[in-house]
Image: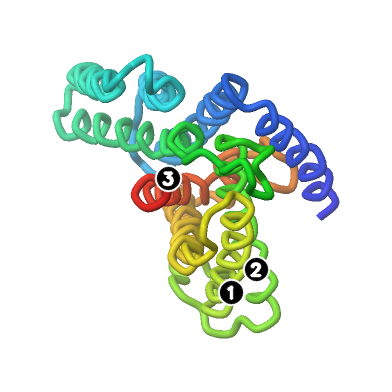
């Protein structure tokens, strides 16, 4: 617990500082986190029995981040970069003398790359989010910082609500074959907490809090799905944590797993209904 508290005391201010600066600094930070998460994801895949090409996979993941960071520069070429990356991974897998192993190598590497590259939606949200009206309470944050803050607090509030309610009232558990600690009470508590926080942030960003009725549960459930997806990967690899990078917290993938699913869901909702 002491290690967790010390790590959080260092990581949270650093994260908020990166968000405050935004722009290229945020993109570089997301790229760095993606590299670390990719390293752990490919290690877990290997330990689960799926050979990969970590270097090519990491480059493929970074191409997705690059597309998210510079949408106006690439103008649709991001998809081309990703396609070329998938082709290069396929060509590299041709060298495997066993076609079945080569196919596994290609599929696992592509999966690992696209899985961790979902972090790119954190950056894309900042570009795609609507302008914050001048009279809004959080107008001083600007669109990029304001909407990414909504994403961060939605995920954190879900995790906090699920932990507190689940510990106090959790009896019935679900998907115990993936994660034995998840309870229905925690799920409800997390969704309620995320919905309340999203409503407050939407109001602060000049949007109708009524959108939280959908966006709150969607963000919370997506965060839970991201956590369960990484748990499934760790279970397959017979690993407790994705790594040991962060004392008391495990690896980088352990810290960002919820955002891998929540970021694209929140971005899609914002672009479809609020932009």
1 or 94, which lies in front? 1
Helix, strand or loop at mark 1: helix
- Name above or below for residue 138 compared with residue 89: below
Q: Residue furthest front?
A: 135
Q: Earlier in the sequence, mark 2 or mark 1?
A: 2
Question: Do the residues under discs 2 and 1 have CB atoms within 8 angstroms?
Answer: yes
- x 67%, y 46%: residue: 138
Q: How is the image coloured?
A: rainbow
Q: In terms of depth relative to the viewer, which is nearer, 89 or 221?
A: 221
Residue under circle 2?
Answer: 161
Quadrant housing residue 149: top right
- Residue 212, percent from left and from top: 50, 64
Q: Identify the image quadrant of the N terminus.
A: bottom right
CA separation, marks 1 and 3? 25 Å
Query: Residue 68: where, in percent of width, then height?
Result: 42, 27
Residue visible at 37% across and 19% down?
72
Position of 106 with respect to 265 (left or right) is: left
Q: State the residue lying farthest toward the left.
A: 99
**Callout 2: few (<14), some (14-19), or many (20+) C-alpha neighbours within 10 Å?**
many
- Which residue is denoted by mark 1 in the rendering? 186
Residue 50 position within the rendered picture, expressed as x and y whole percent measured from the top left: 33, 38
Locate residue 230 relative to residue 205 in the image: left or right. left
Q: Relative to 176, is 29 on the left or the right?
A: right
- How much space separates mark 2 and mark 3, taking CA atoms? 22 Å
Determine whether the residue tagged by mark 3 lies in a helix, strand or loop.
Answer: helix
Q: Is residue 11 left or right of residue 200?
A: right
Q: Earlier in the sequence, mark 2 or mark 3?
A: 2
- Whether 233 is drawn above or below 143: the answer is below
Where is 85 relative to 162, above or below?
above
Residue marked by disc 3 = 267
Quarter residue 156 falls in: bottom right
């Amino acid at each position: 617990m002491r290690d967790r508290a010390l790590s959080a005391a260092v990581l949270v201010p650093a994260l908020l500082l990166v968000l405050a600066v935004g722009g290229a600094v945020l993109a570089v930070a997301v790229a760095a986190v993606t590299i670390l998460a990719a390293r752990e994801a490919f290690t877990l895949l290997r330990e689960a029995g799926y050979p990969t090409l970590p270097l090519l996979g990491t480059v493929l993941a970074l191409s997705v981040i690059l597309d998210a960071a510079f949408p106006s520069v690439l103008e649709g070429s991001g998809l081309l970069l990703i396609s070329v990356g998938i082709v290069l991974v396929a060509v590299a897998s041709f060298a495997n003398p066993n076609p079945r192993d080569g196919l596994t190598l290609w599929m696992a590497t592509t999966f690992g790359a696209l899985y961790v590259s979902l972090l790119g939606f954190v950056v894309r949200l900042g570009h795609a989010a609507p302008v914050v009206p001048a009279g809004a309470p959080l107008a001083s944050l600007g669109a990029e910082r304001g909407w990414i803050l909504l994403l961060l607090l939605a995920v954190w509030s879900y995790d906090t609500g699920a932990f507190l309610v689940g510990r106090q009232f959790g009896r019935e558990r679900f998907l115990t074959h993936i994660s034995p600690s998840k309870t229905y009470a925690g799920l409800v508590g997390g969704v309620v907490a995320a919905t309340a926080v999203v409503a407050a942030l939407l109001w602060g960003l000049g949007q109708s809090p009524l959108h939280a009725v959908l966006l709150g549960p969607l963000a919370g459930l997506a965060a839970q799905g991201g956590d369960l997806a990484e748990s499934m990967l760790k279970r397959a690899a017979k690993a407790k944590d994705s790594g040991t990078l962060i004392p008391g917290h495990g690896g980088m993938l352990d810290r960002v797993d919820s955002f891998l699913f929540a970021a694209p869901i929140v971005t899609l909702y914002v672009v479809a209904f609020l932009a």
